[in-house]
Image: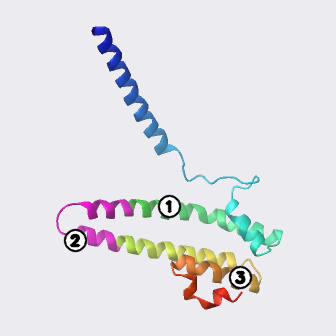
Amino acid sequence: MKKGALILLTALALGLCMLFCTRLMLRHLDTRAMPTEHGSRLPELSWLRHSFKLTDAQFEKITRLHAAYLPTCEKLCERVRESDARVLHLGLTPGEPVSTELSAALRERSQLATECQEALLKHIHEIAACMDAQQAALYRARMIPHALGVSCCANPKAHEH
């Protein structure tokens, strides 16, 4: 009997240890690390290069701008995730439907969304500045509706090109 209890306790202890270690590793693992594609750490830019027929010089400049923007984007995304978690927690808390804490958290989340959109719009215009006038107009027409969170159908000129 003692041997069985010892085996059970050891298995439970190892299971808990594995759970704790896995959670700790996942917390420190950079799950937002960008994938590589054809040797590029910025595969999301390949569509841009081909869609807008960018020159090597344009693409190089845009790649540098995009790489410089990524830490800002990641920090904003982390703040959004934290804000979303707070809003959800407060929204699920029993009590009045919209507590003063929840109302404040919603306002904070709204302000954060505005901050994200402003940063993205600035980035879009920096990228467009690396292009010729026609490329820039097409790029802005395609990207700004997404940055603003509005339907492309709200921008009839986006479909003219």
Name the residue that disc number 3 marks.
136
Crowd tier of the residue under label 1, counting other residues whose Cα lies within 10 Å: few below 14, some 14–19, many 20 or above: few
Q: Which residues are magenta?
A: 84-107
Q: Quadrant of residue 99?
A: bottom left
Q: Earlier in the sequence, mark 1 or mark 2?
A: 1
Residue 161 appears left or right of 10: right
Crowd tier of the residue under label 2, counting other residues whose Cα lies within 10 Å: few below 14, some 14–19, many 20 or above: few
Q: Quadrant of residue 46?
A: bottom right
Question: Regarding mark 1 in the picture, which secondary structure is present there?
Answer: helix
Crowd tier of the residue under label 3, counting other residues whose Cα lies within 10 Å: few below 14, some 14–19, many 20 or above: some
User: What residue do we see at 27% from left, 68% from top?
Assistant: 102
Residue 56 appears left or right of 11: right
Residue 25 in percent (x, y) is at 48, 39
Name the residue that disc number 2 marks.
100
Mark 1 near mark 2, Cβ–Cβ under 8 Å?
A: no
Residue 75 in percent (x, y) is at 50, 61
Task: Identify the main secondary structure in magenta.
Answer: helix
Mark 1 near mark 3, Cβ–Cβ under 8 Å?
A: no
Residue 140 in percent (x, y) is at 65, 82
Question: What whole-number distance in Å separates the C-alpha atoms at marks 2 and 3?
Answer: 44 Å
**Mark 1 against mark 3, which lies toward the viewer?**
3
Task: Name the image quarter holding the N terminus.
Answer: top left
| 14 versus 120 height, above or below | above
